[in-house]
Image (spheres, rainbow, N blue to C red):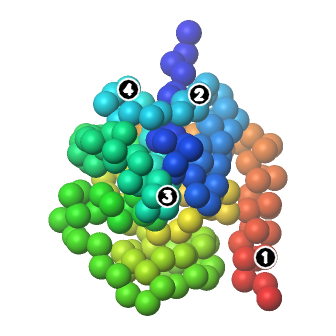
Amino acid sequence: MAKVLKLAGLFPEHLNLNGDHGNLLVIQKRLQWSGFAAEIIPVTSTANLSEFDFVLIGHGSKAAWDDVLRLDHAFVQNVVTYVESGKTALVIASAFDLISDVLMGKANLVSEHKSLFVKTPDGVVGYLNTASVSEQLQWYRKTLLTQLHGPILVKNPKLADQLIEHMGVNMTGDAEEFAVIEELAEASRRIAFEG
């Protein structure tokens, strides 16, 4: 029997402010279309992250983060240990800000608040809503850290495939669904910048 890939969504009731957990559905569907079984698992403790193939850490409000860190005192260290071990994760907005100091030795600096759709130099489209001066997209080992909110992988399926490849999965890419999704993603990227 083939291995079922385990996709963890950390604290989905707290860290899904802009629909970030929709990214898990993108990963799951693309895996399934390539012939791999994948299960999305809501997780409310970081104690056993090593058992997961992929971890999503979404954006949350200050109150949500206060609650998460009260419920899971080792959250930051456990996430950093997971990322440093070479496992794959997607870390979004306030989660990026929270772990960047420990993970990369860079304190989270703030500037003027920005709220707009952006296109990165490598063509990734997403919504920026932050005062953080962290990079919009940054790879660290096999983890993608981003300031772009919401289900970023919906608009950028190639980014989803990069994460899947980092999980050690060889994508076939010949499923009929891939072409349809790319057309929809291209349309959503265009619409993001229309009046």
- Closer to us: 120 or 49: 49
**CA separation in Å, label 3 and label 2:** 23 Å
The disc labelled 4 sits on which kind of residue? Glu
- Closer to us: 170 or 75: 75
The disc labelled 2 sits on which kind of residue? Glu
Q: Is residue 163 visible?
A: no
- Report which residue position mark 1 lands on: 191
Mark closer to the chain start, 4 or 1: 4
**CA separation in Å, label 4 and label 1:** 39 Å
Mark closer to the chain start, 3 or 1: 3
The disc labelled 3 sits on which kind of residue? Gly
**CA separation in Å, label 4 and label 2:** 13 Å
Q: Who's the residue at 35% across and 65% down the image?
A: 97
The disc labelled 1 sits on which kind of residue? Ile
Q: CB under 8 Å between callouts 4 and 2?
A: no
Mark closer to the chain start, 4 or 3: 4
- Report which residue position mark 2 lands on: 39
- Report which residue position mark 4 lands on: 51
- Report which residue position mark 3 lands on: 60
Mark closer to the chain start, 4 or 2: 2
Q: Who's the residue at 59% across and 28% down the image?
A: 39
Q: Which quadrant of the figure contains the N terminus? A: top right
